[in-house]
Image (cartoon, helix red, strand yellow):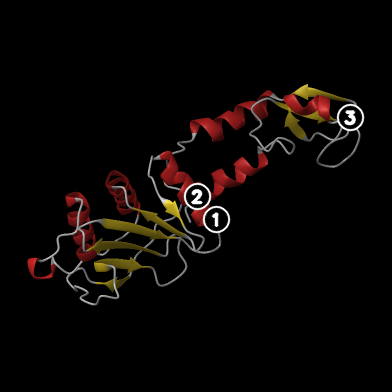
């Protein structure tokens, strides 16, 4: 994980109001315990600190914390990639292998995965008999990566369907193009699989060979 991502996340956690769970944009310091809350909640505290439960006799505006909160929550690029680089070191499927069985709804697929611990587990592109395609992004089941990727995709206007297993399925072509571009820019995809994915995604559909076109 990048040092920058870890540092920013840690700082942001310390700059959240414990009552509102919002950034300390209007921070005040409680006296004498010196804990921080947003000014908007002071009247609700009944003179008791929400952090240490000790009584407080007053409070003061904390401009230093207010400025720091604005720096880390506003000035830091919210569209930045949220994790470390994933090296996809295993190819799982080949696009040139065409599934003929009636049991399979997809006729083609290409996938790459990381064999160890990583921010992303695998990405996969499916092609179907009707020419449509689906792009799948799989995150680890620890929850942290998935939450970050969901927010990242949402900020970049990627439309996806979230599955409880850590999968994000994308079927909208503009969203597929955006998601693939973002992932390819920040991760290592083997050249052969990258070129196949790029070509199909730019085309926007799965080309089914004529001899199999009547399959569906």
54 sits to left or right of 144 = right
Task: For mark 3, give the secondary structure.
Answer: loop
For label 1, count other residues whose C-alpha is less than 10 Å away and answer few (under 14), some (14-19) or many (20+): few
- Residue at figure coordinates x 48%, y 61% from the top left: 166
207 w.r.t. 13: above or below:
below
Q: How far apart are marks 3 and 1 (CA)?
A: 36 Å
Query: Given contact means CB atoms under 8 Å apart, are the residues at marks 1 and 2 in contact?
Result: yes
| Residue 83, numbered label | none
- Residue at figure coordinates x 66%, y 31% from the top left: 24
Residue annotated with mark 3: 47
Percent x, y of residue 97: 19, 74
Q: How far apart are marks 1 and 2 (CA)?
A: 6 Å
- Residue at figure coordinates x 19%, y 50% from the top left: 202
74 w.r.t. 188: above or below:
above
For label 2, count other residues whose C-alpha is less than 10 Å away and answer few (under 14), some (14-19) or many (20+): some
Residue annotated with mark 1: 144
Percent x, y of residue 179: 34, 49
98 sits to left or right of 183 = left
Query: Given contact means CB atoms under 8 Å apart, are the residues at marks 3 and 1 in contact?
Result: no
196 sits to left or right of 157 = left
Is tag 2's residue or tag 3's residue first in the polypeptide sequence? 3
In this view, the residue in front, 171 or 30, is 171
In this view, the residue in front, 12 or 64, is 12
Percent x, y of residue 216: 20, 66
| Residue 148, numbered label | 2
């Amino acid at each position: 994980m990048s040092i920058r991502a870890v540092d920013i996340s840690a700082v942001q956690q310390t700059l959240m109001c414990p009552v509102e769970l919002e950034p300390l944009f209007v921070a005040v310091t409680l006296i004498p315990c010196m804990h921080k809350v947003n000014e908007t909640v002071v009247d609700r505290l009944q003179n008791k600190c929400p952090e240490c439960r000790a009584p407080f006799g007053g409070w003061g505006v904390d401009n230093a914390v207010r400025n720091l909160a604005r720096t880390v929550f506003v000035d830091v690029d919210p569209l930045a990639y949220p994790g470390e680089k994933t090296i996809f070191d295993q190819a799982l499927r080949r696009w040139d292998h065409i599934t003929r069985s009636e049991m399979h709804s997809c006729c083609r697929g290409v996938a790459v995965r990381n064999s160890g611990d990583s921010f992303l587990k695998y990405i996969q592109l499916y092609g179907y008999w009707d020419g449509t395609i689906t792009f799948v992004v799989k995150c680890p089941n620890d929850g942290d990566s998935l939450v970050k990727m969901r927010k990242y995709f949402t900020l970049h206007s990627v439309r996806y369907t979230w599955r409880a297993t850590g999968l994000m399925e994308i079927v909208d072509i503009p969203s597929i193009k955006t998601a693939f571009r973002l992932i390819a820019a920040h991760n290592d995809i083997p050249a052969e699989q990258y070129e196949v994915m790029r070509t199909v995604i730019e085309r926007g559909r799965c080309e089914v060979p004529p001899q199999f076109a009547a399959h569906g």
